[in-house]
Image (cartoon, rainbow, N blue to C red):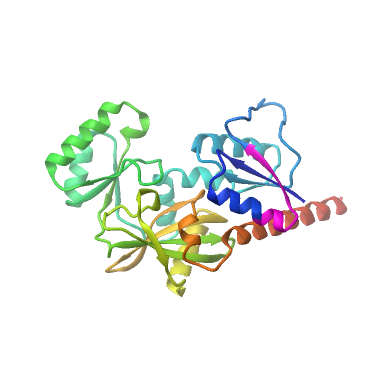
Amino acid sequence: MKLAMLVSHLRTEEKAILAAAARRDIAVERVFDREIWFDLGERRFPEVDLVFDRSLVHSRAEYTLRLLQSWGIPTVNSFETTTLCDNKFHTNMAFIEHGVPTLRTLIAYTPESALEAIEQLGYPVVLKPNTGSWGRLLAKVNSRAAAEAILEHKASLGSYHHSIFYIQEYIEKPGRDIRAFIVGDRVVAASYRNAKHWITNTARGSTSTHCPVTPEIEGLALRAARSVRGEIMGVDLVETDEGLKVIEINVGAEFHGLRETTDTDIAGEIVDHLIKKAAALAERREAALAGR
């Protein structure tokens, strides 16, 4: 069996995954997205059983996964799941359509309609880019004057992505939110992400502490993952007066902070899942050939 991992560079997580694979005598081809190029009409990729996407660049990941799909090379996560989760609007719609409790969200297409939507929702609100990660370009808007300034600034940027105004209700967190990490059909570990700031991403300096995986956490996280047909991902949850709600979901989630709070070998769980999936796909191919 041979696996491949699509990467931008080797972070702590990717190094841990490679080490876990080596302990299992599994070869992993490292495919760096900054080095590869493709002829769209001709397959050009290493011979592998399965590709695990850990690219940091959404566009590179999506284009590569689409090509691999056309060539019949299985991937985790799939092209469909990745493109869905890279777009907050599409992800939120999947949550709503599958009855997953999430934060109230509004979208608008002009600064004028966005301001009207914000005032309808009520201050404070959170303005987010429709694509992005690590808590970048988030803004908590406390007043009409702040809303007008931020909306004007976003409109001046000129990018298509900044012309979709993604507006979300603000939740007063209890100084933390929850990251649940899913591998296959299980939440293998969870952590509280603690911060005095309202943004609790570890990339923004929050600290991780152990969070027990309760039936409520596992049930909601798995429902969120199934709504986007995800296999390996991080689900961010927030505690509200109405119970847990899903903030968002990440296909290329980091887990270095989470590793410090659990005895679970997260990288090993990931590799075991990839091995199991690759073996199941191989058996299916053999069965199909035998049935011809």
- Left or right: 156 with respect to 274? left
Residue 144, given in percent of the width and then of the height, sits at 13, 42
Residue 220, given in percent of the width and then of the height, sits at 44, 66
Residue 230, given in percent of the width and then of the height, sits at 54, 54
Residue 234 magenta-highlighted = no
Q: Which residue occupies the foreground of this view, 257 or 89?
A: 257
Residue 172, given in percent of the width and then of the height, sits at 24, 60
Could one spot residue 223 in this view of the protein? no
Residue 30 magenta-highlighted = yes
Relative to 119, residue 152 above or below:
above
Relative to 217, residue 151 above or below:
above
Relative to 287, residue 213 above or below:
below
Q: Tell me the residue at 49%/51% (across/down).
A: 253
Res 87 → quadrant: top left
Q: Tell me the residue at 61%/62% (across/down).
A: 269
Res 267 → quadrant: bottom right
Q: Which residues are magenta?
A: 20-31
- Left or right: 2 with respect to 218? right
Q: Which residue occupies the foreground of this view, 147 or 196?
A: 196
Q: Which residue occupies the foreground of this view, 49 or 16?
A: 16
Could one spot residue 226 in this view of the protein? yes
Res 245 → quadrant: bottom left
Q: Tell me the residue at 27%/54% (across/down).
A: 198
